[in-house]
């Protein structure tokens, strides 16, 4: 029979478990790089692609959340609701698993950027026309400036 009481042995077990878990948490917090640090270590090409596709991933996440809300509101089984096809059912195996069409997304984004550029140039041309008209008004009243 052991000379140490039962509670002491269990206290040692819990202490050892807490030490192991604490060491794991501490190592995880110190070794794992932050998102910004990880992205800064990418090559310039990968970093540019990451930044370019960041908005697409956010759009996909929004679409996925819409599907989840739709599925949660439905009474059908989870594998029968929503536009995502189940790989287990034959008629749904060849469905596209993309939530957002990449080409359409990039096309609409480019169109929006183009519209913004056109809008900005129109505003600049209006400002320039106003400045020219003000310049003409000032010069027409000043007789000695000619």
Image (spheres, grey):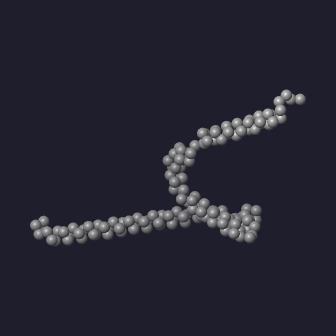
Q: Position of residue 61 (x, y in %)?
A: 60, 60
Q: Is residue 82 visible?
A: no
Position of residue 35 in the picture relative to residue 81 (left or right): left
Q: Residue at x 39, y 68 (%)?
A: 119
Q: Quadrant of residue 9?
A: top right
Is residue 27 shown above or below 52?
Answer: above
Percent from the top left, x then y, of residue 114? 44, 65
28 is higher (above) or lower (below) than 108 = above
Looking at the image, is 25 positioned above or below residue 109? above
Q: Quadrant of the C terminus?
A: bottom left
- Front in this rendered view, residue 76 or 20: 20
Residue 101: % across, % down? 58, 64
Direction from residue 62 to residue 137 in the image, left or right: left
- Is 85 on the left-hand or right-hand side of 103? right
Query: Which residue sits at x=54%, y=59%?
Result: 55
Residue at x 74% of width, y 38% of height: 17
Q: Quadrant of the N terminus?
A: top right
For image coordinates 77% across by 36% down, the residue present is 11
Image quarter for residue 6?
top right
Residue 52 in sight: yes
Horizontal side of 128 relative to 49 (left or right) equals: left
């Amino acid at each position: 029979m052991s000379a140490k009481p039962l509670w002491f042995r269990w206290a040692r077990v819990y202490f050892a478990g807490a030490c192991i878990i604490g060491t794991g948490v501490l190592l995880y917090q110190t070794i794992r790089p932050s998102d910004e640090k990880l992205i800064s270590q990418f090559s310039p090409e990968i970093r540019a692609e990451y930044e370019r596709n960041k908005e697409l991933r956010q759009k996909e996440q929004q679409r996925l959340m819409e599907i989840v809300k739709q599925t949660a509101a439905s009474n059908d089984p989870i594998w029968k609701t929503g536009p995502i096809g189940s790989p287990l059912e034959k008629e749904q195996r060849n469905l596209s698993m993309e939530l957002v069409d990449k080409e359409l997304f990039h096309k609409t984004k480019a169109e929006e950027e183009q519209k913004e550029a056109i809008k900005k140039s129109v505003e600049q041309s209006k400002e320039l026309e106003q400045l020219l008209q003000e310049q003409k008004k000032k010069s027409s009243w000043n007789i000695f400036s000619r």
